[in-house]
Amino acid sequence: MSANSSPISPLANQVLKPGVKWLPFQREQAAGVLRRSGIDENGQLLLVRSAAEILGSGVDPKLGPNKATGLVVGYVQSGKTLSFTTVISLARDNGFPLVIVVAGNKSNLLTQSHERLRKDLDVEGGEGLPAWIMEKNPKSQGGQYEQLLRQTIANWRDATRDGDEKPTLLLTVLKQNQRLSSLTALLRSLDLRDVPALVIDDEADQASLNTKVNRGQESPTYTRLRELRDALPCHTFLQYTATPQAPLLINIADTLSPDFVHVLEPGVGYVGGEVFFARNSPYVEVIPINDIPPTNALPIDPPDSLLTALRLFFVGLAASIIIHSGRRRSMLIHPARERLVHQSSAQWASAAKDSWIGALTAPSNDPDRREAITDFRDAYNELLTTEPNLPAFDAVIEKLPRALRNTTVIEFNTRGSPKTPEINWRHAEGWILVGGQAVDRGFTVDSLSVTYMPRGVGVGNADTIQQRARFFGYKRSYLGLCRIFIEQGLKTAFEDYVEHEQTMRAELKRIERIGENLRTWRRRLILDPSLHPCRRSVVSDPYTRTRAGGGWTQQRGALLTASARQGNAETIASLMRDLRFLADTSYLSKETAQRHQIAESVEMQRIIDALVEYRFEDPRDTAAFTGLLVTIGEAFRRDPTLTAAVYRMRPEASGRRDINADGTIENFLQGRTDRPGGYPGDTFFQKPDRLSVQLHSYDLRIGKKVVATAAPLIVFYVPPSLARDWLIQVQAGQ
């Protein structure tokens, strides 16, 4: 597109969303990426609008030096690379002369990202002056890279050049100490104050963050990224990840703590945890505990479940060859990290493949052939339960020898070589990859259909577990051929993570929708107590877990400032206004101090509004009641018909409670009386099937001195049916 062509904006005719600071325009480069994406017109529109919102939430290239940090959250294997490719193309269309992509901490991941960017941006295409100059791991030594950078900047400053005569310099760099240091030294050699730059940190929760923060030190990669950002006076730093727990939980004053968030929606055909780990999922098989041998006592023969998984893979591959000539399929065997296990697993897969080739090409009356056909028929019948359109079994058997012969088994690790091997997927119709850490994160297994993962939860970091889900992705067209074999504990962890992920995404979408700065957001994540959100080494601020299984939550900070206490009294009065309170008859007493009132069915929204306004000053209360608020909100989102019971405790009696010198109170609820017909205790007054709220009011004293009169105190009961396990982090200044 020439400089005189009329640009369009993906956000044209729209009011800028809260948090979006400027309006990017779509010109030739973004249009080209969309054309080459292979997605339909509506998908292209959604993609470029998302990219425009991301870029527009960062620095405006026309306004001079400034910095912004954005968090972009997608699902595992959902197309994050296409998103940041589109953002990069828009950056060129809108005057960014420099783009840096920090692409993984392994060479194979860098190569994967570099080559895909080269292809999707059509770096080598076109005639005349190039739109892109692309380099990988530029070095500070020698003059060629400095000259290249100087020429690029000079061209962008040259007013005599049209926009399409100004190439953008696109640098990909390994997320590694020396590589980042070399790039930073190169950038420091120039004056970049008027040069807007875009920096993409792919897999931003890995390696980037400061793993020594709790020791008051900096880890090397973190230091290099901080120095890189310091060398760019005007830039937007985008953190792309499917597991944002760690970037969200680091200290909000950290240079890598994000300002804004954008949640990516997957395209048509994506299949993730909600499908694979739904209740009674037909796609997941549990590996028996006896099939997960210790690494120091590997058996000679392969586990039966591995052979079952291999047969399912080969039947699916043979069917794909019949239905889609030339269609590839891959299998991933993902055991523990020890390379001895990798070696044995690869040998088992190769031996089984060779054995089945021999059996299936033997005469029809050969007993090994008959046994093999029987076993493959069982696999065929299993796949029929999820893929009813399989070709006839006889046709599949006919293609099986081809499928077996044209499958490559490869150890995907660095055993015997300093580098993880690179794969040209077109060299075989079938692939069986055996690997550990190399396929944990970032790496895309082409056309993956069967996964065999004989490993446990490990240390229980939720983000690490989710990143193992290489089996997610755009698989709708062949979902029926997919199977996941995992250990029971890991299956449970994935099932728990699905709810955690959906709740976290909903919360981040809310923040994005209202344009709230992420630094002011009180971190709250639903998370099974057996899991940690991420590695603790990067989190300096403590977080609190709410009590699992429901139960009682009561206010501990009793003595607030006079203004906070008055505000809380007004909040309680507003909650009670227009409610119909009746005498509670579940326990009858002549004592006014043992008589209470109840409003049976109060709209949940009124409870939420009151809890939002209620103020706490004890950090434990802030954390506990924030978790309670999110629990109630999530329950109400799932079922808008929910109601609560509200109790006015002792409304006709005055009472006093002694508090500690620091203004806290351990327990202000009256206990039960141990005699027939005695008072059952305050905790008796709740509804087992719904949220129950108790409103108390007491004069407070320290020693014999009354320090507050009619101070409101609140108590909540959450029934097990509504309970969730929440992790809450409130940092200073939030």
Image (spheres, rainbow, N blue to C red):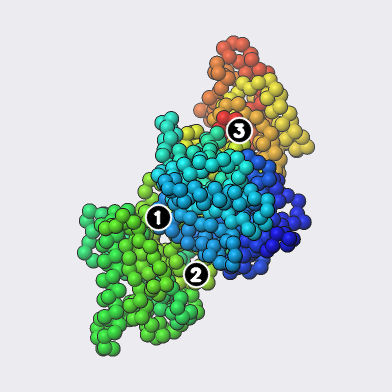
Distance from disc 2 to disc 3, alpha carbons, whole Å, reads 44 Å
Image coords of residue 310 (percent x, y): 35, 70
Q: Earlier in the sequence, mark 1 or mark 3?
A: 1
> Residue 479 shows which numbered tag?
2
Left or right: residue 364 versus residue 104 is left
Up the image or down, 558 lies above or below 685; here it is above
- Local crowd size for mark 2, using a 10 Å CA cut-off: few (<14), some (14–19), many (≥20): some
Dot 1 falls on a residue whose secondary structure is helix
Q: Quadrant of the N terminus?
A: bottom right
Distance from disc 2 to disc 1, alpha carbons, whole Å, reads 31 Å
Q: Which residue is mark 3?
A: 734
Image coords of residue 577 (percent x, y): 77, 35
In percent of the image, x 68 and y 25: which residue is there? Answer: 564
Q: Nearer the viewer, residue 310 or 191?
A: 191
Check contact, mark 1 vs mark 3: CB within 8 A.
Answer: no
> Residue 56 shows which numbered tag?
none
Q: Earlier in the sequence, mark 2 or mark 1?
A: 1
Q: Quadrant of the C terminus?
A: top right
Indicate which label's residue lies in the foreground, 2 or 1: 1
The answer to whether residue 501 shows anywhere in this view is no
Q: Check disc 1 and give the amino acid type.
A: Ser
